[in-house]
Amino acid sequence: MSKKNRIRLFAETPLKIGEIYVANEDQTHYLKNVMRLSLGDEVFLFDGVNGEFETQIIEMSKKTLSLKINKKVFNFEKSPDVWLLFANLKKENTDIVVQKAVELGVSKILPVQTEYTFNAKLKPERVKAQVIEAAEQCRRQDIPNVESLQNLQQILSNWDKNRTLVYLDETGSGESFSKTFSKMKPPVAFLIGPEGGFSSKELEMLKSLPYTLSVSLGKRILRAETACISALSCWQAMVGDWK
C-alpha cells in the first residue's frame, strides 16, 4: 500500500509486537466496506501509550477483522501540556474547534457553558469520536482528554491555581499576545468565549482571579472558532512543539 493511501487508526488496547489486535465493529466496517481492504493489507495502529505500529490484516469475517502487529514505526510522543476551554458553539463550528484543537496539539478539551453560550447541549461521545478521528488523521501519538460540558463558574471554583488561564478579551482591553507571552507561566490553558462574548459579570470575575491573563488578538473581532485556532497557533509557534 502506498504512503498516499496509508490508513491509521487508534487502538483501544495497548499494542505489542507479535500480538494480534482485533478491530472493533466501527473499525471493521471502515477497513472492509469503506477502504475495501483485503487480507495482507497494511494498517498502522497507535495506542496512545506505546507508539505507532505497522500491522497486517490476517483474518477477516463478516463482523470481525484481526491484524498482526509486525513492527514499531514511531515511539510514543506526548503532546504539550496545554488545555483549551471554549464556549459551546453551533454544531458545525464546535466540530471545527475540536478538530483544529487536536491538530494543534492540545492535551485537554473542556467545553464551557457561559451566560451567552449559544448551544448548551453537547454529546460527549460525539466529541470523543471526533477527537479520535482528528488524531488519526494528523498523526499525533496521543488522544486529548475530553471533559463534559461544565458551567464556567464551576470550572473556575475547582481550578488548579498553578495553571495559568489565558482568556481572550474581545473588548480590546487585554494586552497583545506577544506582550503577554512572557507572563504565561506553564502549564497553560486558553479560554475562548462564545459568539456573543463574555458577559460583564464574567469578565469581572476573570479579571479578579490571580492566575488569569487577559489577551487581545488584535483590532478585528474574530469568530470564536478563529480565535481558538489563532490563540493555539501563537502559543505553538512561541513555546510549543513548533519552535
Image (cartoon, helix red, strand yellow):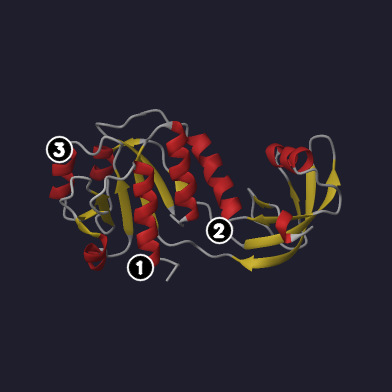
Which mark identifies residue 32? Answer: none
Which mark identifies residue 140? Answer: 2
Tell me the amino acid under the disc marked 1. Answer: Met
> How much space separates mark 1 and mark 3, taking CA atoms?
31 Å
Q: Nearer the viewer, mark 1 or mark 2?
A: 1
Which mark identifies residue 200? Answer: 3
Q: Earlier in the sequence, mark 1 or mark 2?
A: 2
Instruction: Specify the quadrant that holds the N terminus.
Output: bottom right
Label 1 secondary element:
helix
Q: Are marks 1 and 3 in contact (CB under 8 Å)?
A: no
- The 10 Å Cα crowd at callout 1, few under 14, some 14 to 19, many 20 or more, is few
The answer to whether residue 239 is seen in the rendering is no
Measuring 55% from the left and 58% from the top, which residue is drawn there? 140
Residue under label 1, please give it: 238
Measuring 71% from the left and 37% from the top, which residue is drawn there? 25
Label 2 secondary element:
loop
Instruction: Specify the quadrant that holds the C terminus.
Output: bottom left
- The 10 Å Cα crowd at callout 2, few under 14, some 14 to 19, many 20 or more, is many
